[in-house]
Image: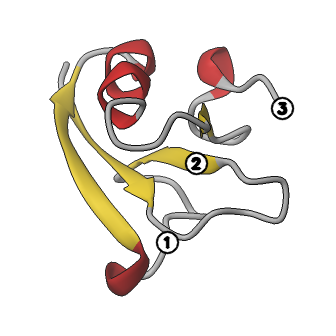
Amino acid sequence: MFEKYYVNTKAQSNGDHEVHSESCEYLPEDDNRGFLGRFSRCQDALQKAKEAFKNADGCYYCCGPCHSS
């Protein structure tokens, strides 16, 4: 099943730009997120986010397999 993924365009205090699924309760506000596309896995969304933000990381809550820091 494909889900929509977004990246937080505003970096966290550690410099990471978090990737979130559309259903995440921590999804950033509209003005602080960029649409990445529809993916079946967070790994694919994270790879896309890293094209724009080298410090992209998965959200701990909705993209646990892609969260590293």
Q: Is residue 35 above or below residue 44?
A: below
Q: Label 3's element?
A: loop
Q: Label 1 sits on what residue type? A: Pro
- Residue name at image x 18 percent, y 25 percent: 2
Mark found first going from the N terminus, 3 or 1: 1
- Residue name at image x 32 percent, y 31 percent: 51
- Residue name at image x 57 percent, y 31 percent: 63
Q: Residues within 10 Å of mark 3 (few under 14, many from 20)?
A: few
**Closer to us: mark 1 or mark 2?**
2
Residue 62 appears at what percent x and percent y? 58, 39
Q: Label 1's element?
A: loop
Mark found first going from the N terminus, 1 or 2: 2
Judging by the rendered image, the residue that carries numbered circle 1 is 28
Q: Nearer the viewer, residue 7 or 22?
A: 7
Judging by the rendered image, the residue that carries numbered circle 2 is 18
Q: Left or right: 49 with respect to 8?
A: left
Q: Left or right: 19 with respect to 14?
A: left
Q: Residues within 10 Å of mark 2 (few under 14, many from 20)?
A: many
Q: Label 2 sits on what residue type? A: Glu
Residue 36 appears at what percent x and percent y? 23, 43
Judging by the rendered image, the residue that carries numbered circle 3 is 69
